[in-house]
Image (cartoon, coloured by chain):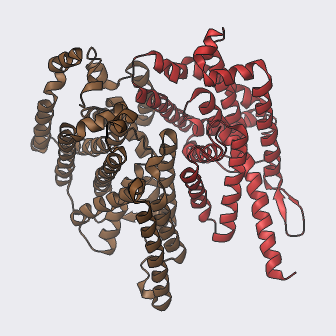
Chain colours: A red, B brown
Amino acid sequence: MSDDLYWGLVDLANGLLSGATLGGFYAVIAMGLSLNFGVMRLVNLAHGDWLIAAAFLAFAASRLLLVSPFIVIPIVVLTMFAVGYVMQRGLLNRVSAEAVARSDLNAGFGVMAPVLVTFGLSIVISQTLLAIANSDTRSIATPLSYSAIRLTEDLSISTLRLIFFFSAIVILGGLSIWLRTTHYGRAMRAAADDPETVRLMGMKPDQIFAIASGIALAMAGVGGVMIGMLRPFQPFDGPSFLLVAFGVVILGGLGSILGTLAGGILLGIVQVVAGTYFGPSAVQVAGYMLILMVLAFRPRGLFAR
Amino acid sequence: MTAITERVTSSPAHYRPLGLAVVGVAMLCLPLFANGYAVYLAFTFCIFAVMGQAWNLLAGYCGLLSAGNQLYVGIGGFTLALFNYYGGFSVWTALPLAGLSAAAMGALLALPVQGRSQSVRHLIAVAAVVLWLGYEVAITIKPALDIFGSAYTRRLIFLLIIFLWELPLLKLEGPYFAVATWLIAAAVESVMTEWRVSGAGAGMRIESTANLTHLYFTACGLLILSTFGLWLILRSRFGPALTAIRDDAEAAAAVGIDIQAIKAVAFIAGALMTGLAGALYFMDATVITPASAFTVFWSAYIIFIVVAGGMGTLTGPLIGAALYVLIDRVFGQTFGYGLLILGMSSIFVIIFLPRGILGALARGEVGVRASIPW
């Protein structure tokens, strides 16, 4: 085999491998947003800031308890679940599509109300983080963040990303099975389709929405820990992760779990491959153009329901 | 029907144009008796009110919820900076060019939607590709022709332009449209961050010869012009068409309103207004970076201004902009935490004043907003 061909293949394999594993991370980041939209029809602009808040929570917990960030994941996930539940019950249920439909406000407002409330939340979260933790960058890197598994002499893969990839499959797969087979999962899908009928069947859509929101933020908790392990973060990083999450959700089709995973992997591969061939500055642009192109040809995403 | 007519004739909305005119005259006289800080606040108010009017035209009337109006702020600002720095243009000469290039960007995004001329559109794209290849050849022969300074950025810019030309942006709906506009702004931002000619990530300085009073009069004139222009449009036969699209797009299409054409015109007009306002803002700020010009916070402020003031109304963005200046500039600079207060008031407004401030003031005229445009 000629040298050029060999290195070309190594580059390609590298791009595919690290892109696909990056995609797992993207899928976890985006899942909460997808769930928010899929169940509550809620465009949650605060999602990126919740991710960063979770990263800060993991940072604080692992510093206080003097343990590895992996140990504090359950704490972060449970706290975020509680926050999501309370936020939905106390605030977001008041502006849900159903609540707006019951009042005499016009339909355009029904779209705008949650957007503006979550925009307000987004600012409140990032400003609160800024007030507590100032604008220094933080990191919860573990020794695993810098290790890699060698596959061949010239091909290796980041251990951490590989772990993230398999966790993504387990988490998203678990969620998918839970939504299909359990009572609450079915109730959630029913509430997504028709909250009014769910109410007639004797269940409380508000309660179901609160649990869905809790799960969404619990996922954001996992995503936040992942962000913290992969790179340094600071209070204002939320919107850039929100944009990535939006991109993944749109690639996969809003509200589709397997679509989210596939969308994440596709975005990861395109970004890393573009970075390999056109330099690091092409990473972002290639990702944006991929998403726009999918929108142009399949306006409701690749795996729309 | 009679009920609606009754409400219209008896509603205070009837007197609003007169009230607006009084406010406009008062604002023009402001520098005569106010100090510099008050004029600066009024200048900021005008800028954000114009941006609010532009966004309201799209969202309030055409149902296009854009999250990417920072694109035109950035394009306007950078056009101004580039002509000012490389062309030696004064900021006042560069200002109309900034508006034009923002409008051109809007046209690039909005025109592809016209269904009748698909083949013409593709022909133009092919012609653009041919011209681009010709330019590439010309550069290899005579490198002095390259005004982009970097082969990578040049190719990226051309590719992006042709790509955006082919993208049917206005066909997207709801959240897809919002995210697409944001993505386009983010894509242009990352190009600008790479481009050495525009100062890469560090941005550019603008040699501004403008003093605050002149800036204020220009911004105020722009606001009066755009508000009056919108008022005229809403009174013309496009007004009922716009209102019809706002209230029920399908029914509007069924009675023969060319929705796509009206949306495209509104989109380009909005881009022009936002670009001019953005350029004015940077004439005062004198420093522009890709991060400050293309930040999604522009959209966030604009959306706050329109929704808090009253969406789909002519005076709503004015009230919202006044509230924004009050919270962010006055409270923020006096007590700190301006953004925190802005975030909280955004939640507060939606929960307690869901029709916006204007809607709350006009409580009791329930049917009015559905029947008249201001």
In this orientation, does residue A238 appear?
Answer: yes
Left or right of A176: which side holds A256? left
- Residue B356 picture location, percent across and down: 34, 25
Point out residue B300 in the picture as x, y percentages from the top left corner.
43, 40
Q: Quadrant of the C terminus of chain B?
A: top left
Q: Is residue A173 above or below residue B226?
A: above
Residue A30, given in percent of the width and then of the height, sits at 65, 41
| Residue A198 drawn at (x, y percent) | 63, 15
Q: Looking at the image, can residue B336 be seen?
A: no
Tell me where residue B275 sits by quadrant: bottom left
- A146 vs A130, left or right, is right
For the point 37% across and 47% down, the residue is B260
Query: Looking at the rendering, in which quadrant would you find the N terminus of chain B?
Result: top left
Q: Is residue A133 above or below residue A143?
A: above
- Residue drawn where x is 22% and y is 38% of the image: B234
Q: Residue furthest bottom?
A: B141
Q: Residue B102 vs residue B217: left or right?
A: right
A42 left or right, relative to A258: left
Foreground residue, A51 or B72?
B72
Which residue is rendered at x = 67% and y = 59% of the image?
A: A270
Q: Nearer the viewer, residue B199 or B96?
A: B96
B50 or A125: nearer the eye? B50
Residue nearer the viewer, B210 or A274: A274
